Amino acid sequence: MIIAIDGPAGSGKSTVAKLVAKQLNYRYIDTGAMYRSVAWIAQNKGFDLSDEITMAKIAESLDIQFVPGDTNGQSVLVEGKDITAHLKNESVGRGAATVAAQKAVREILVAKQQQIGEAGKMVMDGRDIGTVVFPQADKKFFFVADAEERGRRRYEELKIKHPGLNLQTIIEEIRQRDHEDCNRKISPLVKAKDALEVDTTQLNIEEVTKHVLKNINNPTK
Ligand code: DC
């Protein structure tokens, strides 16, 4: 059983995917963390992120593990080192959008995701899980939400650690990220035809989680 949750940044997919996985006793795989890890490694080594051959080499040798831990319930280890906190940085997010637009990087990471998924009992979130990684996924969800609301959520999440943040700037960044994700040539963000669209703008985390679980258990709803 594979449950695919796709959608734009800030639509609530990773928070809900984690809770759904916990409820079902499934594993949660954050595919965005894989693109972010490639960007993080490249940035740390001072590489040019537009160098597609080097980025593909990093993706190919990426040693990533998702393990229980962290305040959010899951930690990301790269070469055995917990880099969860680093992956949330805005510059890593921007870098991830750059490498996620590269054909070779996508092919390598998609293959890794498919391999991870072979074990079954997974909730996987990203942009292309229901369309490219697991088009045969048992359940597919596509989350959407207004950019203003997504920006507000990101702002609330970041403001304690980064008091100087400006809400309007964050909303603009979300719009920019949407533009990049939806307009890239390879695997742009699109809803799979058989995915259930969930507009999370007016819903809280518990409501979305409930809705997803209800649909998994009773697909007619
Ligand atoms: O979900 P996120 O913000 O952690 O994703 C980081 C970047 O990676 C974002 O630009 C979208 C991209 N991504 C992707 O193209 N395909 C995925 N399956 C997951 C993320």
Image (cartoon, rainbow, N blue to C red):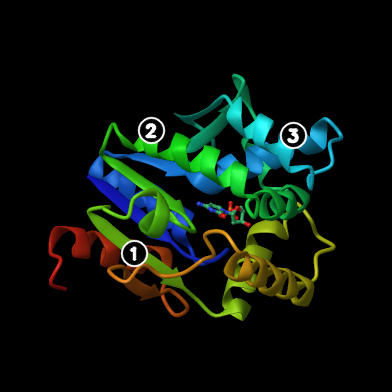
Indicate the quadrant where residue 203 lies: bottom left
Residue 141's disc number: 1
Indicate the quadrant where residue 214 lies: bottom left
Q: Is residue 48 left or right of residue 98?
A: right
What residue lies at 64% left-to-right and 44% top-to-bottom? Answer: 36
Q: Is mark 1 within 8 Å of ligand 1?
A: no
122 or 19: nearer the viewer: 122
Q: Is residue 60 left or right of residue 96?
A: left
Three-letter amino acid code of the residue under disc 3 = Thr
What residue lies at 30% left-to-right and 34% top-to-bottom? Answer: 118
For the question of whether residue 163 can be seen, the reply is yes
What residue lies at 46% left-to-right and 69% top-to-bottom? Answer: 190
Local crowd size for mark 1, using a 10 Å CA cut-off: few (<14), some (14–19), many (≥20): many
C-alpha span from label 1 to label 2:
21 Å
Three-letter amino acid code of the residue under disc 2 = Gln
Query: Which residue carries the number 2 mark?
Result: 115
Query: Which residue carries the number 3 mark?
Result: 54
- The mark nearer the N terminus, 1 or 3, is 3
C-alpha span from label 1 to label 3:
33 Å
- The mark nearer the N terminus, 1 or 2, is 2
Label count reads 3
Local crowd size for mark 3, using a 10 Å CA cut-off: few (<14), some (14–19), many (≥20): some
Q: Does the CB distance between marks 1 and 3 fall below 8 Å?
A: no
Q: Secondary structure at mark 2?
A: helix
Q: Is mark 2 within 8 Å of ligand 1?
A: no
